[in-house]
Image (cartoon, rainbow, N blue to C red):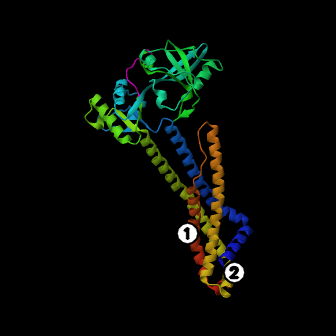
């Protein structure tokens, strides 16, 4: 029997036993479908996070506060974050530090930032909002834009001017369709004049910037929070091709200013955005691989189901095998036919799983977009290659044992089987 005839025979048997074929393929289809969804979701999450990181600029360097470990001197990022969330305050990073960094040859400009949460009122409207204290150079680095009015100037920052720029969302909550420019809002017993409204931006790194209220950093420090330190500052490089050396220069400047001789006791962390993107790429790839390893379990289950069905097929067709051998079919012919049937079963399951997986992945992208996420639907070619390769692999692995069992049957004994 030729390969073509073997395929036709296999398809005929699959159509004749639709229920058994469907149940056999179910586990494999689910596994292959999950492979496609995992790859697509991985690409979607990666694209979402990358686009949000890139909104801060790939030519930027982030310098933020960090809590050093007082016992060993080691400053773990996770321990630092936990300590800061727990209320530990680091007050050593200042605008003067940022200005010192600005004098480095590869630094074009920087902006400092402090964040507070306040109850903001206008007339009878009262809303909670994040107040974002920023340097006037913010729009020179960040991708945010204005929809109305203007941003505050360096002179207004230095003079502690009581001015604010509203995020798109907070403007809508306080003023609705009315013009906000020139109006006065209040919080912490102070009045602030609205001079601008930011364009709609949405959520970036799980923070909704449309609900932010932007004001001069010194005004927020002195008139509202009563502090001198900042939380972080973002620096823009002149030449983004050498972030590592620039990071080292910033660290050297800050260690001298903070009188730190041991780098393990740094009270700051300096990270190039390009480096953060590389780390994120590594993490998302590792997560995808881990999920695929878990999915492999369901594929094994599907493969075992196919092997069981093939053994049943051998039992049901024992007389047929004996008859074929009696008229001259070799053991290799029998082995090939049953192996082709197993591979064909898994490939059919693979194709169905690919189609269903693509459909579910598209549905996930629609749901993500409906939730306001910049999710791009994408199924990489390697997802289909991996899925169909898995199908063929499991067809061979789990089909070869029943096929060999069929090939080894003695024709006389097989013909005696009823």
Q: Which residue position holds label 1?
A: 397
Look at the image and say whether residue 214 sits in the magenta stretch: no
Q: In this view, does 279 lie above or below 109?
A: below
Q: Which portion, as a residue range, is magenta? A: 223-231
Q: In this view, does 225 lie to the left or right of 306?
A: left
Name the quarter where the C terminus is drawn. bottom right
Q: Name the one closer to the observer, 33 or 202.
A: 202
Under tag 1, what secondary structure? helix
At label 1, counting other C-alpha atoms closer than 10 Å, the crowd grade (few under 14, some 14-19, many 20 or more) is some
Pinpoint residue 165: horizontal percent, then vertical percent: 53, 21
Residue that appears at 43% across and 42% down:
274
Q: Quadrant of residue 170?
A: top right
User: Label 2 near label 1: C-beta < 8 Å?
Assistant: no
* Left or right position of 2 against 235: right
- Measured as percent of width and height from the top left, residue 289 is found at 50, 53
Q: Where is residue 192 in the image (x, y as percent from the top left)?
A: 52, 14
Which quadrant would residue 300 be assigned to in this image? bottom right
Residue 71 position (above or below residue 45): above
Residue at 62% over, 22% down = 172
Count of residue discs = 2
194 to the left or right of 24: left
Please provide percent x and percent y for residue 337: 64, 76
Q: Is mark 2 on a helix, strand or loop?
A: helix
State the residue position of label 2. Answer: 320
Q: Which of 13 and 301 is in front in this view?
A: 13
Could you tell me which residue is drawn at 35 percent across and 38 percent down?
Answer: 246
CA distance separating discs 1 and 2? 24 Å
């Amino acid at each position: 029997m030729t390969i073509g005839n073997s395929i036709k025979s296999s398809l005929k048997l699959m159509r004749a036993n639709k229920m058994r074929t469907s149940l056999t393929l179910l586990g494999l289809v689910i596994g292959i479908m999950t492979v496609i969804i995992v790859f697509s979701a991985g690409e979607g999450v990666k694209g979402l996070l990358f686009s949000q990181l890139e909104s801060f600029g790939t030519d930027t360097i982030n310098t933020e506060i960090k809590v050093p470990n007082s016992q060993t001197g080691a400053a773990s990022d996770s321990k630092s974050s936990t300590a800061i969330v727990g209320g530990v305050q680091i007050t050593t990073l200042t605008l003067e530090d940022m200005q010192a960094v600005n004098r480095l040859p590869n630094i074009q400009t920087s902006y400092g930032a402090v964040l507070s949460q306040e109850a903001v009122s206008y007339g009878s409207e009262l809303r909670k909002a994040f107040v974002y204290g920023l340097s006037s150079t913010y729009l020179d680095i960040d991708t945010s834009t204005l929809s109305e009015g203007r941003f505050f100037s360096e002179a207004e920052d230095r003079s502690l001017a009581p001015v604010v720029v509203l995020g798109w969302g907070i403007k809508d909550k306080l003023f609705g369709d009315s013009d906000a420019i020139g109006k006065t809002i209040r919080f912490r017993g102070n009045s602030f004049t609205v001079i601008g409204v930011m364009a709609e931006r949405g959520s970036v790194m799980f923070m909704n910037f449309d609900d932010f209220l932007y004001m001069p950093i010194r005004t927020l420090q002195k008139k509202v929070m009563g502090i001198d330190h900042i939380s972080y500052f973002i620096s823009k490089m002149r030449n983004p091709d050498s972030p590592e050396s620039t990071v080292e220069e910033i660290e050297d400047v800050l260690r001298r200013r903070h009188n730190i001789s041991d780098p393990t006791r740094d009270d700051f962390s300096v990270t190039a955005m390009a480096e953060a993107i590389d780390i994120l790429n590594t993490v998302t790839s590792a997560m995808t691989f881990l999920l695929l390893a878990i999915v492999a379990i369901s594929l094994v289950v599907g493969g075992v189901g196919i092997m069981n069905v093939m053994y049943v097929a051998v039992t049901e067709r024992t007389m047929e095998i004996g008859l074929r051998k009696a008229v001259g079919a070799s053991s290799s012919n029998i082995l090939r036919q049953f192996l082709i049937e197993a591979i064909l079963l898994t490939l059919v399951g693979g194709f169905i799983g690919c189609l269903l997986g693509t459909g579910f992945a598209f549905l996930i992208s629609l749901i993500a977009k409906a939730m306001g996420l910049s999710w791009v639907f994408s199924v990489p070619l390697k997802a289909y290659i991996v899925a169909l390769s898995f199908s063929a692999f499991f067809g061979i692995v789990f089909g070869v044992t029943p096929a060999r069992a069929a090939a080894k049957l003695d024709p006389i004994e097989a013909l005696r089987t009823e």
